[in-house]
Image (cartoon, rainbow, N blue to C red):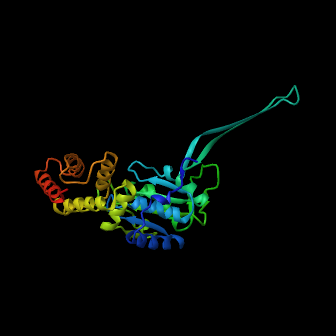
Amino acid sequence: MSTVLHANPKQFVSTKFTQQIVRRALRYLQSGFAVHLRGPAGTGKTTLAMHLASLLGRPMVLIYGDEDLQSSQIIGSQSGYTRKKVVDNFIHSVLKVEDDLRHSWVDARLTMAAREGFTLIYDEFNRSRPEANNALLSALEEKLIILPPDSNQSEYVRVHPQFRAIFTSNPEEYAGVHPTQDALMDRLITIDIKEIDPDTERQILSSRAGLDRWQAERLVQLVRRFRELAEPIKASSLRPALMIAKICVEHSIPISGRNADFRDICHDVLLARHSHSTEAEVVLAQCLDALGD
């Protein structure tokens, strides 16, 4: 089934920082509550959610929040028709024809996960409009999903005892997100994901990109120093460091402030959010000069 995924726990980097979050979240999930991982972009919320799903040992179903997401895309909808035609000509002088035309109901991802006891990961759920998420209220509280009355089946789906839900979101001041209704937040246990510590960031760069410890430490220091000086009010993200690390490893470019290729990569990746900012360019040049060989 293409909508069902299996997480790969080997991709997760376990450190004291991540273990503390996982321990708390897993405790809530095992008690039957939905967990909400909230934090800035690039802090590893989706990776954490998939790791938690792998620890639960059940297949997972993934939904991405979207402005155009409809309730029917979460619950299910009518999709085409099923036609059954029976022709009975047992007696040659009598022709009996039965023609039955019915709508076909197809479960969407929430309904499928709830019915089968899978783990639902709803990534950036606050990018969907609040009314699209109404079906989650009864699924999380009453353990029922209410289906449209013309779905040619029971109007209710009872939630499987092993069904679990993990939500991720960015803070409400981010562009493209909607305020979350209080009724849904009351059904979630929220864990705020802060900026990861340098040791965790270094281990992620080593594991995901293949940098050795010394080069990973140098890159972490460079990126953090640049953010500190050029982006004091912006949330940090691990993604730029990962981009730089991956490119340098694949093209054998040293993490060196004196290497022209490395300076070009840092310029292209780190200045993306500072369009035509001379000040940011000067700060980056100073950080690279300080990095040295």
Query: Which quarter shows the C terminus?
Result: bottom left
- Residue pushed farthest front? 293
190 or 21: nearer the eye? 21
What residue sits 29% from the left and 51% below the top? 244
For the image, the number of numbered tags is 0
What residue sits 53% from the left and 57% below the top? 60
Q: In the rendered view, would you say 204 is above or below 273?
A: below
Q: In the rendered view, would you say 167 is above or below 76?
A: below
29 or 90: nearer the eye? 29
Residue 59, position in %: x, y? 56, 57
What residue sits 59% from the left and 52% below the top? 149
Q: In the rendered view, would you say 91 is above or below 35?
A: above
- Residue pushed farthest top? 93
88 or 243: nearer the eye? 243
Q: State whether residue 138 appears in this view.
A: no
Residue 13, position in %: x, y? 42, 63
88 or 26: nearer the eye? 26
- Direction from residue 283 to residue 10 in the image, left or right: right
Residue 45, position in %: x, y? 39, 61
Residue 195, position in %: x, y? 30, 66
Q: State whether residue 33 appears in this view.
A: yes
